[in-house]
Image (cartoon, rainbow, N blue to C red):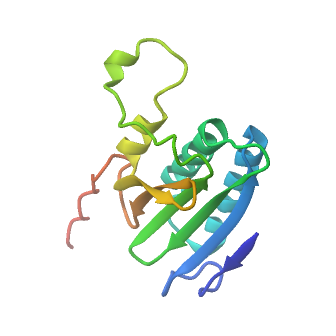
Amino acid sequence: MNQETVTAPGEPTVGTAYFRTTFPTTARGAHTARHAAERWLATVAADDMATPSLLIAELTANAALHGRVQGRNARLALTLTPEILRIEVTDARGERLPATPPDAEAEGDGESGRGLLLVTSLADAWGCEPYPPGGKTVWAECARGARCPLRGARLPAPPRC
C-alpha cells in the first residue's frame, strides 16, 4: 500500500491527500482493500464516512465480481481534497463496462444487480473511463461537508443566532 498525505491525523485537509492500494479480484481482496481505505480515511478526514464506505464497498466488490482476470489485480485509489473525495477502482476488464442502472422496479426480487443504483443515489457523480491497454476505471465522487446520504441533497444551514 502506498500512501501520501499532506495533513496531520485529525486535522482538516488543507491540500490533497492520496491513498492507493492494489488488491486481488476476490471477495476477500475487495474486503481487505475497503478496510484499508476506511482506516486511512479515519486518519485524514473528520467527515462522516458512511457514504464513502458504501461507495468503496460497492466499487471494489464490482471489480472483484465483474473485473476479474486471472493473475491481474485491481487498484483502489482515493483522492481527498477540501471539497471532494474521489474514489477510483481500476480493473483489467475494459470490455465489461458498467451498465446504466436499470429502473429498480424492473429488477424484481433478485438478490443482486442493484449496486450501481446505490452508487447513483449516493455519489454526487460517477462514471467509467478506459484504462489502457485493456482495463477500465470506475469512479465516484462525494462532496465533503454536511450532506444527507442522498444525491445532491444538502442539510439546511443552521439558524442564525
Image quadrant holding the N terminus, namely bottom right
Give the answer, above or below, for where 37 lies relative to 149.
Answer: below
> Where residue 128 sits: x, y (%)?
43, 53
Q: Residue furthest top?
A: 109
Q: Residue at x 28, y 57 (%)?
A: 154
Q: Quadrant location of residue 33?
A: bottom right
Q: Residue furthest left?
A: 160
Give the answer, above or below, for where 50 lies relative to 8.
Answer: above
Q: Quadrant location of residue 21?
A: bottom right
Lateral position of residue 21 relative to residue 46, left or right? right
Of 132 and 89, the residue lying toward us: 132
> Where residue 127 sits: x, y (%)?
39, 53
Give the answer, above or below, for where 128 lies relative to 8.
Answer: above
Q: Residue at x 48, y 87 (%)?
A: 14
Q: Quadrant location of residue 133?
A: bottom right
Q: Residue at x 38, y 74 (%)?
A: 83
> Where residue 11 sits: x, y (%)?
57, 82
Q: Residue at x 36, y 42 (%)?
A: 121
Lateral position of residue 11 relative to residue 99, left or right? right
Lateral position of residue 118 relative to residue 17, left or right? left
Image quadrant holding the C terminus, namely bottom left
Of 31 and 135, the residue lying toward us: 135
Figure disc tally: 0
Give the answer, above or below, for where 7 lies relative to 70.
Answer: below
> Where residue 155 sits: x, y (%)?
28, 56
Q: Residue furthest front?
A: 133
Of 127 and 40, the residue lying toward us: 127
